[in-house]
Amino acid sequence: MKLRLIKFFKDFLLWSGILRIFSPLNHLFLFTRNFNLLRKWISGANRNTLLINDFYSWKRDYPKRFKLYEAVSEGYQLDKKELLYLEFGVASGSSFFWWLKKNTHPGSVFRGFDTFEGLPEDWGGFKKGAMAFSLGEVSSDDPRAGFEKGVFQESLNPFIEANRELLHSKPKLIHLDADLFSSTIFVLSQLYPYIHKGDIIFFDEFNVANHEFFAWQIFTESFYVKLKPIGAVNNFYQTAFVVE
Ligand SMILES: C[S@@+](CC[C@H](N)C(=O)[O-])C[C@H]1O[C@@H](n2cnc3c(N)ncnc32)[C@H](O)[C@@H]1O
């Protein structure tokens, strides 16, 4: 009886399309759902075990992210380790060049992915095309560094096909700084087969409920991947995880 009622109710919604009256609230509903999940996750995270954490601080200080990098680098001795560093969202290269300077192992490989023409979609107050820096502005003489220009949706898979061995052989530091849900979920889902225990993943806008957090939530729940938080700053705006 209960199932028949549910079926009838769903059929009615489908036939009538009546829920369209709530369309203007779609974003708010999604935000409410994701924000509540984010807040619940923060409450459940064992903040005492993090290498660095400032929850709750009233001031957001974007450069504090370098303190997170420093803490994780020190905690996992990443400065001397042979790494594959993959950054998604390079823009002017602040974070990319921080890690390139920090890690001195000659066998490390650094690759930065970006359109180098700015965001491919609007993101909050930022319009499509915002944060554009040309490839010429971020070039490096370091032979370990290289860049892949284009939307990830076109550049990542050719890179994966050409570098399967590399992706499996070196411990990875994956830096997700593309802001958008679509970009972040795409990267995580394509890199999934190459993500191994001990790899480290940074989210630069983790606490943005409908974007990086949503991608993290969909990815961890759909791919059954366990990511343990290891450090966070700016109230989890920047958060680092290790793959378990
Ligand atoms: C916040 S900026 C990166 C900031 C940079 N990591 C830093 O430390 O200064 C975000 C970048 O992501 C890039 N981006 C976002 N989605 C992308 C996609 N699907 N494909 C390629 N680039 C993307 C944008 O072009 C933009 O340059």
Image: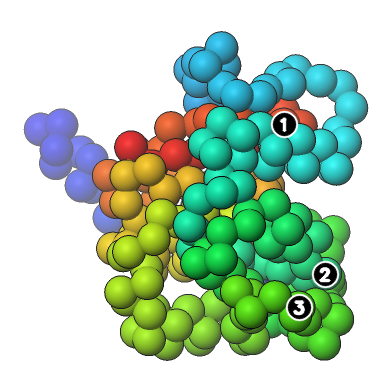
Q: Which residue is mark 2?
A: 92
User: What x and y, as percent, mark residue 155?
Assistant: 52, 84
Q: Circle 3 — which element?
A: loop
- Mark with earlier residue (2, 3): 2
Residue 120: image location, x then y, percent: 69, 77
Q: Amino acid at mark 3?
A: Ser
Dot 1 or dot 3, earlier in sequence: 3
Displayed quadrant of residue 98? bottom right
Q: Which of the two marks, 1 or 3, is nearer to us in this view?
A: 3
Q: Amino acid at mark 2?
A: Ser
Identify the residue at image location x=20%, y=47%. 7
Residue 83 in the image: above or below residue 9: below
Q: Is residue 11 above or below residue 209?
A: below
Task: Say what secondary structure mark 2 lies in.
Answer: loop
**Mark-to-mark CA distance, 2 and 3:** 12 Å
Dot 1, crowdedness within 10 Å: few (<14), some or many (≥20)?
many
Residue 53's spot in the image, x, y percent? 67, 23
Identify the residue at image location x=63%, y=54%. 103
Q: Which mark is residue 233?
A: 1
Between 15 and 50, which is closer to the camera in this rendering? 50
Q: Which residue is mark 3?
A: 140
Q: As drawn, is 101 to the left or to the right of 2?
A: right
Image location of residue 176, percent across then percent down: 59, 57
User: Neighbour class for label 2 at 10 Å: few (<14), some, many (≥20)?
Assistant: some
User: Does label 1 or label 2 sit earlier along the sequence?
Assistant: 2
**Amino acid identity at mark 1:** Val
Residue 95 appearing in the image: no
Helix, strand or loop under label 1: strand
Q: Which quadrant of the figure contains the C terminus?
A: top left
Work out how far the residue at label 1 is from the one at label 3, CA to CA, in angstroms: 28 Å
Q: Residue furthest left?
A: 1
Q: Is residue 86 left or right of residue 10?
A: right
